[in-house]
Amino acid sequence: MTDSSNSTVLFRHQNVNHCAECSLNPICLPVAIDPEELDRLDAIIQRSRPLHRGDHLYWEETPFEAIYAVKAGALKAYTTTDSGEEQVTGFYLAGEVVGMDGIHTEQHMSSAVALETTSVCEIPFDRLQELTQNIPGLQNHFFKLMSREIQADQQLMLLLSKKTAESRIASMLLSLAERYKRRRLSDQRFRLPMSRSDIGNYLGLAVETVSRIFTRFQNQNILSVEGKEVTILDRDSLCKISVGQDEPSCKPARTG
């Protein structure tokens, strides 16, 4: 079964109405939360219709009211520059939380749009604040999520500081592989929900450069690429490209 089939199966299995039934529970919720506390959290979560590709979950500068756990599919976050151009700031996969950029300013600092059919769990922030005061494990979990967002911003700056386009793309692929692994999917063969244009925008590269590097990686037998399906054939080489040939180890940066 290919990962595109896996994605279809995952979406079907994530069409559940309770956190306890969701296979992503261990990823987006704290491990220590007990069944009674889980029921209290489940009671405030709103589950709406799936978003279709191109549908927005929220827009930049709109009031911040909730955070969202991606149940299936994928989202792209982006901001709009003064000149009206789109700048991609991250990608969010199933089991990840999006929307926390608005906590401080009480309005979203970016927009979030579905890259494919996407289902989310909406968690009203005022209700969540009430719960976290009584469920220490939940409060600690969301502190960790916010810390991860800060780390992601730092990793993005590190990623964009890499000298070569090859190292940027290699780092992003290794990061996505790790994120799919957390979802208990293959970290060797997976689907890229974003377009080559989105990848280039995110990494500060021309779309032609992105396509050329994917082709080069294929010719070097580092990757196998069929449309949006990617198979990592030589992880060691990809790691070396990511961190630099002279570096002793490979630590892929998280993107999104």
Image (spheres, rainbow, N blue to C red):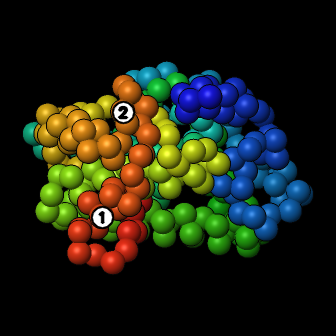
Q: Residue at x 73, y 31 (%)?
A: 13
Q: Position of residue 121 (x, y in %)?
A: 64, 40
Secondary structure beneath dot 1 equals helix
Locate residue 14 relative to residue 220 in the image: left or right: right
Give the image quarter of residue 82: top left
Mark 1 nearby-residue class (10 Å; few <14, some 14–19, many ≥20): some
**Three-letter amino acid code at disc 1?**
Lys
User: Split into 4 quadrants, where in the image is the N terminus?
Assistant: top right
**Three-letter amino acid code at disc 2?**
Val
Secondary structure beneath dot 2 equals strand
Q: Residue at x 41, y 37 (%)?
A: 230
**Toward the viewer: 234 or 74?**
234
- The answer to whether any part of residue 33 appears in the image is yes
- Residue denoted by label 1: 240
Q: Position of residue 160 (x, y in %)?
A: 21, 59
**Toward the viewer: 172 or 255?**
172
Give the image quarter of residue 59: top left
Q: Position of residue 254 (x, y in %)?
A: 41, 59
**Toward the viewer: 62 or 207?**
207
- Residue denoted by label 2: 225
Q: Sequence order check: which comes first, mark 2 or mark 1? A: 2
Q: Position of residue 78 (x, y in %)?
A: 31, 43
Locate residue 45 relative to residue 205 in the image: left or right: right
Q: Residue at x 25, y 55 (%)?
A: 168
